[in-house]
Image: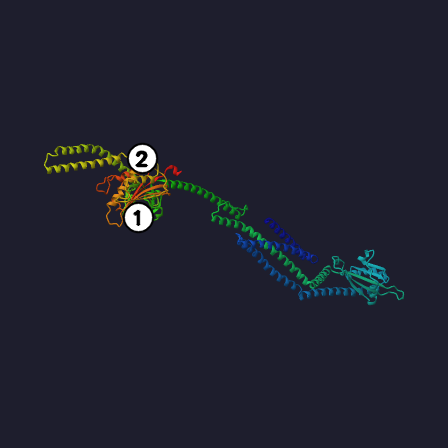
Amino acid sequence: MRRTIAVGAVTMVIIGLMLLYLLTQATNNRELYESNYGTLFAINVVVATLLAVAIAWVSYRLAVRLRQGRFGSRLLLKLATTFALVGVMPGLLIYVVSYQFVSRSIETWFDVKVEGALEAGLNLGRVTLDTLTVDLAVKSKAAANLIAENPESAAGELAERLLEQLGASDIAIWSGNGNLITSVGQSTFQLSPDKPSTSQFRTARQQRSLAWVEGLDDITPTALSGARIKALVPLASAGLGLNAEPRYMLVTRALPANLVANALAVETANREYQERALGREGLKRMYIGTLTLSLFLAVFGAVLLAVILGNQIARPLLLLTEGVSQVAAGDLTPKLALQGKDELGGLTRAFASMTQQLADARAAVESSMSAVDAARSNLQTILDNLTSGVIVLDAAGNICSSNPGASRILQMNVASSAGLSLASLPGLESFGAGVQKQFEELSSRPLDTAADHWQQSFELGAGADRALGPFDNAITLVARGAELPSQMHLLVFDDISEIVSAQRAQAWGEVARRLAHEIKNPLTPIQLSAERLEMKLSGKVAAPEQAVLVKSVKTIVDQVDAMKRLVNEFRDYARLPAAELKPLNLNSLVQDVMHLYDLDNAKVPIRLELEETCPLVMGDAEQLRQVIHNLLQNAQDACLTAVGAVSEPRTVTLRTQWQSASKRVRLAVLDQGDGFADHILKRAFEPYVTTKSRGTGLGLAVVKKIADEHGSRVELGNRLKDGVVLGAQVSLSLAIAPDVQA
């Protein structure tokens, strides 16, 4: 469509130029112009109409683009308007000036002075011809009298002499009947010389002379050589008879060529002047019409060319602008480029090449980013699955990022504390201060120091020092720190509480074995020796000494029994067999154990809260029985030794609970005693750590060891309400049976 419009516009312009050429040619030929003016005007109107239709169609398309808000419409409209004004305004100025010039020039052509000058020239020519005619007539009369006075036989010779005197080209003597008597000059050689008419003979006889001009009637090029003056004079008859035949002398003189030419020019100019003076309005209309048609075609052609050229110039600019907008929006797809050899075409190609390079660069960057993201994802996956806690700190000790292991070990959502100082988190004041101190010492070390990191163990306390969910518990951390670029710090820490506990349990097991071996063997001889002394000395000593003896022996036997029980407990702790895990019903196990307790008459009642939906768990029934006995015994002892008056009897609660989130069954024992002291919480699972005056401290140690065999973690802590201790709680979670999991 664009090519069709361009070809049509060029065709119209060529036709318009051809018509303008024909108009300029027609103005030089008035007859041709007047005969073809209507046709030329109609053709010009048709061409101008077609151009107007093309301009209207292009303008409509441009208006539609502008109304639709299509990209680049305003730029195209601006360029088209600019080119149109550049073409139209000078044309209108030239038209106005030319119109005034033509109108006033045509009026000046027909001035009174010009008309008077032409009239004076005509009169001058007429007077000159009349003077020459009268002069030739007078001289011809004198010559006729001279010939009449001489004999008729001498008329030819005399005429020969008069030819030169009169300046004539021809002298002929004619009879009254029109017969040539004699002639000299040019007529001598003519077979039929020009003869005057009968009326001319009659006029000459009546007026005694007749002179006239020939050859000036037709304005032709032959008039310059054929124009002449003729004088016809009657000759007096020499005889006296009445029958004497009259004679006439015809004198012919040629007019000067320049005189004839000037006369003809003045006559022609005057005639044309009069004709154009009569048709000057038509002449004005002819010139103004030609000028108007020329302007009409020029203006429409200029507007159409303005639109086409504006479109040609705007097209690469629109491509560039649209491409820049797309690039700014992030679209780096291949862009269109013009194949023209001008600078704008080269600019579009350069832009397309630049866009392609940007697309390639972005593809490379995206590939690199994908690799980085993949590496980051792998690293994040590694960090998320690390059992160690990882925290990135800034120079001020504020948390930048952390992994789930840190939240698990510290038992709080560390990720939600990003931007806060580690030392500002509840319970981590001393830990954060210690970590920051270690980083400051690392930064102050000389650069040549071999160590580029630090390692330190921290023990996070319980009670007011720290709150771990619903319980208070002591954990031991080993932390390592290193410096990262941009003044960032990397903190990696592990919970070694289980390791420390296992090491302590192993050490106590070794102690228990040695105690069982070193202490148990001498206890029996000591007891037997004391009983033998009592038996040998009984009745042989006085009563007071007998009482002392009995009392002493009893004391020795009782203490030996206590020592045996202690050694047996240590032996049992050291020799605790590996758990044989089998599916069992925890609620049924608890109820079996409760048959051994007098629930109604016990000093400390036991209340059961068993969840019926608890599934089967994997456990060793004998070891779990021991766990339940130990926990219930400790809880009842705590209630009995509690201080402070209460309105109702203190109770112990034994609870089972199904935890759907973790897919485990929780066994918990809650008492209403005084709770654990802070120093007990830190070492509650160590052997011989107890608050009882006669306790061995192996109850929780055995529970911890059995829990480890079952893959469970023992949690213990104080139950608080508004800062008041309501009692202690010990719990462990057990894994459910595989069939239940499936």
In this view, the residue in front, 513 or 493, is: 513
- Residue furthest out toward the front: 600
Q: Residue at x 90, y 65 (%)?
A: 243
The quarter of the rendered structure image containing the C terminus is top left
Q: Is residue 704 visible?
A: no
For this view, does 202 lie left or right of residue 268?
right
Q: Is residue 204 left or right of residue 391?
A: right
Judge whether residue 360 can be spotted in this image.
yes
Q: Residue at x 57, y 52 (%)?
A: 309
Task: Give residue 472's position: percent from left, percent from top.
Answer: 29, 45
For residue 307, side relative to residue 140 (left or right): left
Q: Position of residue 260 (x, y in %)?
A: 73, 60
The residues tagged by marks 1 and 2 sit, at their Cα atoms, a distance apart of 38 Å
Q: Amino acid at mark 2?
A: Ala
Residue at the far left in the pictured view: 542
Q: Position of residue 40 (x, y in %)?
A: 67, 56
The residue that disc 2 covers is: 579
Residue count near mark 1 (Cα–Cα under 10 Å), binned few <14, some 14–19, many ≥20? few
* Mark 2 crowd level (few <14, some 14–19, many ≥20, 10 Å Cα): some
Q: Is label 2 in a helix, a strand or a loop?
A: loop
* Residue labelled with disc 1: 426
Q: Name the element at disc 1.
A: loop
Tell me how many marks there are. 2
